[in-house]
Image (cartoon, rainbow, N blue to C red):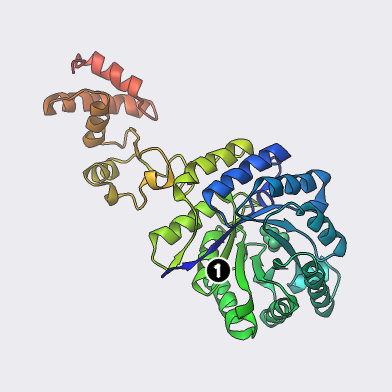
Amino acid sequence: MAEKVYIFDTTLRDGEQVPGCQLNTAEKVEIAIALEELGVDIIEAGFPISSPGDFNSVVEISKAIKEPIICALTRAKDIDIDTAVAALQFAKHKRIHTGIGSSDIHIEHKLKSTREQVLEQGIAAVKYAKKYVEDIEFYCEDAGRADIEFLAKMVEGVIAAGATVVNIPDTTGYTLPWQFGDRIKYLMNNVKNIDKAIISAHCHNDLGLATANSISALANGARQVECTINGIGERAGNTSLEEVVMILKSHDLGLETNINAKNLYSMSQMVSRMMRMPVQPNKAIVGKNAFAHSSGIHQDGFLKNRENYEIINPADVGADSSSIVLTARSGRAALSHRIKNLGYSLSKLNLDELYNHFLELADAKKQIEDEDLLKLLKHADLLKK
Ligand code: KIV
Ligand code: ZN
């Protein structure tokens, strides 16, 4: 039987940190409801100490959501934890996400502290939060660049203090997939109480490796992935939820999620619209071109059998059917297909004639639309069904 991977969605926290993506409380609640329908296990609803608006969003999301765990972010400080506990008061299932820097660069240059002090502060934060909330996740910030032995010590210490989930963030998106996987493997093999907690991967996309690093973490024992819709997030973004889900569906890694993949496309459109953040056309799974075929060779192969050029059926992610885009690189098979879709059927001779006119127009115009095809048919006197 496949093992469960917990999907921790941070669109409303790490995703919402992106300049220009800020949402009001009502919009956040709307997205949270859609995330619940999508089937995410945990919704990171915000960072309550950061602003009264964020606090209020966590309160309202907590009231609106029934199934997923509602998570609130804190620093390893009592005041942050108190504020998060208050914001989560109405949550049916709640989690505090606290943590501190774990790399020497963060410890020395950001926290102006020492390894011993951050370890002590992290453990104290878990113990403090545990007095109010049972489910405590601890993040070892910048774990991708931390000394691995110190990281293992931190993970062991916070689990002993009561952490139920330990987040290993590649905060700067620095690691390569096998390096990140090796970090997880090291922790699985060297932290003696590791079986008492779930290990989580939180990867950033600075080198375009967030999804690959998250999958590598799963292959080495992590069982929770932190991700966002459309991969939005600080700088180059976070791991993209839709990519992780469809990778686990497309490959038999013995792992599964609870996500209703058919909601992925509408969820992506909703987040893009509400956060005013367009989805790049070539974005895997949810981009406008993810199921579009434009070169003659691909179109011909696709029309013979979809699986020649598609590993995912667009219907499986709730996207419109695949599209055949007509450009100067398209062949007769694609032209004939689109003409048939308009309700016309041409003899081979007529198709050859039309194809020559089509190429002339396609060289002049980037993309040929249905109106152009109708004009071409009319011009060639082929407008009879
Ligand atoms: O990237 C990161 O390290 C984070 C933590 C706050 C979890 O977002
Ligand atoms: Zn992050």
x, y percent for residue 145: 67, 71
Who is closer to the viewer here, 190 or 335? 190
x, y percent for residue 77: 85, 64
Who is closer to the viewer here, 289 or 315? 315
Q: Is residue 157 above or below residue 284?
A: below
* Image-based side of 361 in relation to 89, left or right: left
The kind of residue tagged 1 is Arg
Quarter holding the N terminus is: bottom left
Residue 357 seen anywhere in this rendered image of the structure: yes
Ligand 2's quadrant: bottom right
Give the image quarter of residue 355. top left
Quarter holding the C terminus is: top left
x, y percent for residue 152: 68, 80
Give the image quarter of residue 348. top left
Query: Which residue corresponds to the image point at 69% horizontal and 74% vertical from the top-left?
Result: 146
Residue to which mark 1 is pinned = 223
Query: Which residue corresponds to the image point at 71% horizontal and 72% vertical from the top-left?
Result: 163
Give the image quarter of residue 148. bottom right
Residue 141 seen anywhere in this rendered image of the structure: no
How crowded pointer 1 is (Cα within 10 Å; few <14, some 14-19, many 20+) is rated as many
* Image-based side of 350 in relation to 174, left or right: left
Query: Which residue corresponds to the image point at 27% horizontal and 44% vertical from the top-left?
Result: 302
